Amino acid sequence: MTRTAALLAFAFALAPLPTTAEPFPARPVTIVSPYQAGGTSDIIARATAQKLSEMWGQPVTVDNRPGANGTLGVMAVVRAAPDGHTLLAIASSGLTLNPLVYPNLSYVVERDLAPITGTGEVANVLVAHPSVAASSVQELVALAKAKPGSLSYASQGVGSNGHLIGEMFRQRTGTELLHVPYKGSAPALNDLLGGQVQLMFDNLPASLPLIQSGKLKAIAVTTAARDPRLPDVPTIAESGLPGFAATAWFGLLTGKTVPPERRAEIEKAVVAALTDPATKARLAAAGVEVTASGADALAARIGSETTMWKGVVDAAKIRVE
């Protein structure tokens, strides 16, 4: 061996190990939430962060970066160092709906993001103002067909979960329902309570107190099975629309460039954090059912629901430039 070759071999022996072989986490971890603080995605992120912090012995913080339909937060994760110290907590709409509705998004889910695990799921409920002369899906459909265009439904915005569920309902029932988009759930609920709009597909945790107080009436839930908090309220599927199921769900992802070994390490830790009894209880109190499904299940769900929603979006020609 020449002297040069020997020196090179010695240098390689002393070189630091690749990132994936380093202890993880080597420093504080950030979970980016592309929404305002206080929403369901944020609640899940903070509960997860607290438990991970205890498990890892490193600070895990939530960084809220709303704006540009979630793009600002997503791109912060895509552009982060590929070492797993920056994670993304996002709602299903950012993975399956936005890419269909916003053709000029800066990110492509399959190209730029890698799934870690599904984190939680929230039931949706079709609620109506008490003045609406219908208390079931069948009565509502009959009313809508008798008076086409007379009923309107509020949503959290164009392309939102509530908008697309409403559009799927309209297509499946053959009714004319006027869509009224708002900038978020709060103003939509306010107008529903005031009777300016008649219907809304909303997250159950937000609507439940209003249903219990009689300010809104629950027509049906959008889950595959009845919700134990509203055992007397039927599903849309059992109300004449078999197979109708749509929920708001949430996931944790990294940038695609994070090595698979590191992603697997994070997946194992996050699933353990989410299935911890204290974490599950904290999220259940907020109306969230923990899924902790793992990376493969999350990837499959993104794919299947993107296909489902593409049919709805294309039929309605929903696009936002």
Image (cartoon, grey):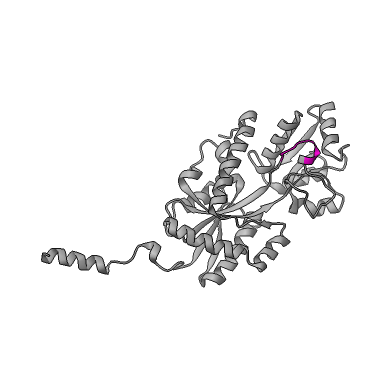
> Is 241 one of the magenta-colored residues?
yes
Residue that extends furthest to the left in the rendered view of this protein: 2
Which residue sits at x=56%, y=67%?
52
Relative to 134, say whether 74 is above or below: below
Q: Is residue 5 above or below residue 147?
A: below
17 part of magenta stretch: no
Which is more toward the observer, 182 or 299? 299
Q: Position of residue 191 (x, y in %)?
A: 78, 43
The part of the image, by quadrant, that contains residue 220 is: top right
Q: Position of residue 32 (x, y in %)?
A: 54, 56
**In this figure, what is the number of numbered marks?**
0
Question: Residue visible at 55% across and 70% down?
Answer: 55
Residue 56 on image: x %, y %: 52, 70
Residue 243 figure quarter: top right
Span colored in magenta: 238-244
Q: Quadrant of the N terminus?
A: bottom left
Asked whether 132 or 303 is in front, the reply is 303
* Quadrant in the picture for residue 11: bottom left
- Mainly helix, strand or loop, the magenta region? loop
Residue at position x 59%, y 68% from top?
A: 51
**Residue 69 in view (yes/no):** no
Whether residue 295 is visible here, answered yes or no, is yes
- Left or right for 230, reference 102: right
Quadrant occupied by the C terminus: top right
